[in-house]
Image (spheres, rainbow, N blue to C red):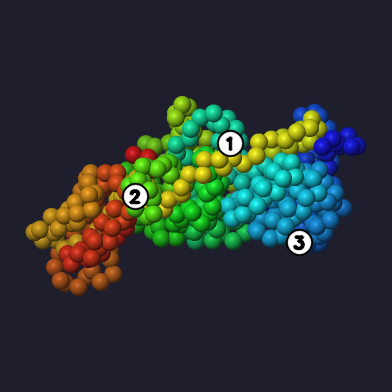
Amino acid sequence: MAVPDGAVRVALLGCGVVGTEVARLLLTQGDDLAARVGARLDLVGIAVRDTSVPRDPVVDPALLTTDAEDLVTRADVVVEVMGGLEPARGLLLRAIEHGAAVVTANKALLGADGPTLYAAADQAGVDLYFEAAVAGAIPLVRPVRESLAGDRVTRVLGIVNGTTNYVLDQMTTSGLELDQAVKQAQELGYAEADPTADVEGYDAAAKAAILASLAFHTRVAVDDVHREGILDVTADDVAWARRTGHVIKLLAIAELVEPEGTEGAAPGVPGVVARVHPALVPLDHPLAGVHGAFNAVFVEAQAAGELMFYGRGAGGAPTASAVLGDVVTVARHRVLGGKGPVESRYAELPVHGVGEALTRYQVHLRVEDRPGVLAQVAQAFAAHGVSIETVRQGRAATDGPPVAGDADGAGDRADILVVTHQARDADLAATVTEVGALLVVRSVLSVLRVEGA
Ligand code: NDP
Ligand code: HSE
């Protein structure tokens, strides 16, 4: 669609942490952006909930409106940085219906109902871009969707939530409690409006769904992603991780698997597993050196090998950088005619549960300290075909954290730390259930997956 009056009209939905920085770049870098696009980007309005809220001086109050429904019909490019499912979804659909290209940072919406938006944009022949929805400033969506379009991606693994990385990092390096660190992440603008989305892993799961869909040309919904957050990670877990040469990171992993026929999977048919959970990462692994709200993602592809993407995964200005990259791209398309690639789902691979993933466990047990206990524990692992890599034992009183009900005078206790070889997650989980039920096992202190070793 040509640009009638020489300028591309841009509407901004939202003027919070990200929206303010998007407005700043649009308003302060106009000449450069015009040169790159081939036409001026004219910010025609900014939709907010409340126009009377004090804003950054860069935002001209005359641009503010609460009538987003009207605003989206007056633009060539609509940028959605308001968040949430509605009214964001309805507004984007309305914008698409009116022929506007859309740019969104809203991973929650794309994870929940991306296909509706992709289909609408495809049908209307307009662009739908969302680089900022995954890993903030890091160019990741476009490399996976476009640069690797000629390769076969086999695995995507990394840290995609800045808030939880900040929280775990603060727990590790400064000994902060989880609540204190979450509050700091909110103050720094990393956390979602409701930080539950971050700490319970919903945000990372939405990003994993988006990445898995792009990487494997298969529709992966957020509900398909196995999700565990960081609320159960304790200071003791963090301390034990360090003692064993690891750090704990919340990882998002999407990979191709060859299932063994359980959990509804047909043997021999490759499928996709997507999961988000805390994991032990060896201290010498590059992901262990990812601090603060930074994100880092490894992409493994058959011909390219291993690629690593690293940068700021959250915050207003970094996210605005990714948004503006999309705005410039779709505005260029508008000026030159044409549009970018549409979502590709041709492969339609089966999506399996986490039970089909291959991983390793570190299991921390408090047991009775008497002959034959280790043999019983080892037997439970063997019964499920899980091979033990290392076992470390120490006296509970000196080598492990205290456990409620332990000082009952009923005899000595020992702590055992078992690290397994790689096995199916379903077999590892069944092993832990069996071990936990043994009479000689007083408590399963923690179970963490080990990745990157
Ligand atoms: P904020 O909560 O800071 O800002 C939201 C903005 O949207 C506010 O200006 C708010 O108006 C406006 N808004 C919300 N609901 C409505 C509504 N119903 N009608 C009109 N305006 C509305 O959010 P963020 O800037 O942090 O996040 C925005 C989006 O970007 C989200 O989808 C988030 O997931 C995503 N994102 C955020 C990142 C970050 O680091 N913060 C990083 C990557 C993506 P008002 O100001 O009047 O309240
Ligand atoms: N709340 C998100 C995070 C923002 O902490 O990563 C970036 O998507």
Q: Quadrant of the C terminus?
A: top left
Spatial CA distance of label 2 from label 1 is: 30 Å
Determine the CA span between mark 3 and mark 2: 51 Å
Residue visible at 76% across and 61% down in the picture: 49
- Residue at the spot 10% in from the left edge and 61% down from the top edge: 370
Residue wearing tag 2: 261
Nearest the eye: 196 or 283: 196
**Which mark, residue 49?**
3
Q: Is 381 positioned to the left or the right of 143 in the image?
A: left
In the image, which disc is placed on residue 145?
A: 1
- Residue count near mark 3 (Cα–Cα under 10 Å), binned few <14, some 14–19, many ≥20: some
* Residue farthest along the right direction in this orientation: 5
Q: In the structure shown, which secondary structural element does the residue marked by tag 2 occupy?
A: loop
Query: Taking the image as four quarters, which one is ligand 1 found in?
Result: bottom right
Circle 2 residues within 10 Å: few <14, some 14–19, many ≥20: few
Residue 149 falls in image quadrant: top right
Q: Quadrant of residue 358?
A: top left
Q: Nearer the viewer, residue 434 or 26?
A: 434
- Above or below residue 248? Residue 299 is above
Task: Name which residue type carries label 1.
Answer: Arg
Give the percent coordinates (x, y) of residue 347. 52, 40
Q: Earlier in the sequence, mark 3 or mark 1?
A: 3
Contact between labelled residues 2 and 3, with CB atoms less than 8 Å apart:
no
